[in-house]
Image (cartoon, rainbow, N blue to C red):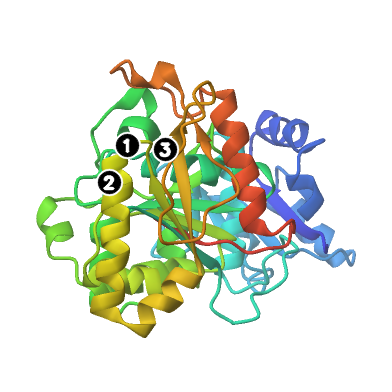
Amino acid sequence: MKRYQLAIVVKEKEYTRRIADYIRGNSFGERWQVSAFTHPNACKQFVKQGYAIDLIAAESDLLRELQPELSHIPSITLVARLGETDGEPELLQYQALPLLLQGITDQFEAMGHKPMRGFTPNSTSKGALVLSVHSASGGVGKTTLALHLAGAASARGLRMLYLNLERWNTSELWLQSGGDAAWDGEGLSELLYAIKSGSTSHAAWLAQHRKFHPQLKCDYLRGFRNQEDRATLLPADAAAMVESIAQSGHYNGVIVDMDDGLDELHYELLMRADRNLWVVSEERSALAKQSLMLQYGRQKFGEAFGRIAARSEVVYNGMNAELGNPMPAVEAALAPVALPLVREWRQGELHPVWSSSSYRAAADRLCAHLLGGSEEFRIHAVG
C-alpha cells in the first residue's frame, strides 16, 4: 500500500503534537506520512528541498500564504465552522481526531485520487457490492442485524455506511448520542434533491454530511427531513441514491435498512443487491408471511425475481438454544448462521446497539460468511 505525504500547517504547536501522538500506532499512519509545520515558509522550504507533498491541510490564512507557490498541491482548509470557504474542500479543525483524520482521507479520495484501502476493485465495475437486509414483516430485527453487520464488517477493516430507507425511521434512537430522536442537519432529503436536480457531486456531499458512529466504527446518513419526502420516494430515485453511494469511492460497503413488504421500490433495490438477507423471527406467522411474499414475488416479477432469490438467504433471528426452536423451512436458502435470542432486549427498554456479545459473535460469523472468507471482498448493503 502506497503511503502518501500529508502536510499539516497550523499555528498551534500543541495541536500538531496531539495529532502526532495519536497517529503513532494508528492505522492512519499506514496510509499517510505526516509532516507538521507552524509557519508556511517552513512548508515551502520543505518542498524546495525536494520532498513531495500529496496533500496540504492548513488553516485558511496560512493556506493563502502557501499560494501561489504550492497551488499545484491538493489542499483542504481547516476551519472553525463549515462553509467558511467558497466551495473549497474544508474540514472542522477542532473535532475528534479519528473523524478529522478519516475526513482528510475521504476528502483526498473525493478529489479523484485512488482509494488507499487495498481492496480488489469490483469485477463488475458497479462500485461497492450491495447487500439487502429485508423481510416480509416488521419487528423481526432487520435494523438490529443491519447495524451489527455494519459493525462486524468495520471491525474487519472494511469502510461501511449504514443507510436507513424505512418509511418510519427510528434508527436515530440507536445511532444518535443518548438516543436523541432529533434529526436535524442535511440528510437523505438533501441527497434526494441533489439526485433529482442532476447534481453529480455526490462524493463531496457524502464527505461533508455523513456521520460517524464511534461504537460501530461505521458511517451513517441522517434520515429524510420530512415524511413526505420518504412517502413519495420513487423506486428509481431510491436505486439512484444507493448507486450514488456505491459509486462514491468512499466505501467498501453500505448497508441500507429498508421497509418490510414487497412493492416496486423493494424490487428495484433487491435487483440492485449483490447479496440479500431475508430476516425471520421464531414466530410462525413471520415464516408464513415470508413464504407468501416469496410466492407473490415469483408471480408478480417472474424470472427476474428468481435471480433475486438466487442471491438471497434466510436468517433466523431470536433462536432459543435451550429449546432448539424447530422451525419449518422457508422457500429459500438458509444462511448457515442463526441469530441468538437476547432476552435482555425484550424488556421493553432501549438497548445499546452493541451490548450483546453472543449476538455480536453471530453477526460476525454471518459477516464472514457473506465475505466468503476474503478480507478483500467489497460489500455494499441494502436492507
Tell me: residue 307, above or below residue 154.
below
Specify few, some or many for label 3: CA neighbours under 10 Å numbering under 14, 14-19, or 20 or more. Answer: some
Say which residue label 2 marks. 185
Which one is in front in this view, the residue at disc 1 or the one at disc 2? Answer: 1
Precedes in sequence: disc 2 or disc 3: 3
Give the residue at x 63% y 68%. 74
Which one is in front in this view, the residue at disc 2 or the one at disc 3? Answer: 3
Tell me: residue 214, above or below residue 286.
above
Give the residue at x 33% y 40%. 140
Q: Amino acid at mark 3?
A: Thr
Q: Amino acid at mark 1?
A: Glu
Query: Residue 285's image quarter?
Result: top left
Residue furthest toward the left?
228
Seen in the image, is 200 located left or right of residue 300?
right
Say which residue label 1 marks. 283
Where residue 68 appears, as percent x and y from the top left, is: 62, 71
Disc 2 to disc 3: CB gap under 8 Å: no
Where residue 272 appears, as percent x and y from the top left, is: 42, 74
Seen in the image, is 197 located left or right of residue 40?
left
Say which residue label 3 marks. 144
Where residue 231 appears, as percent x and y from the top left, is: 13, 59
Give the residue at x 23% y 59%. 189
Query: Residue 11's image quarter?
Result: top right
Q: Secondary structure at mark 3?
A: helix
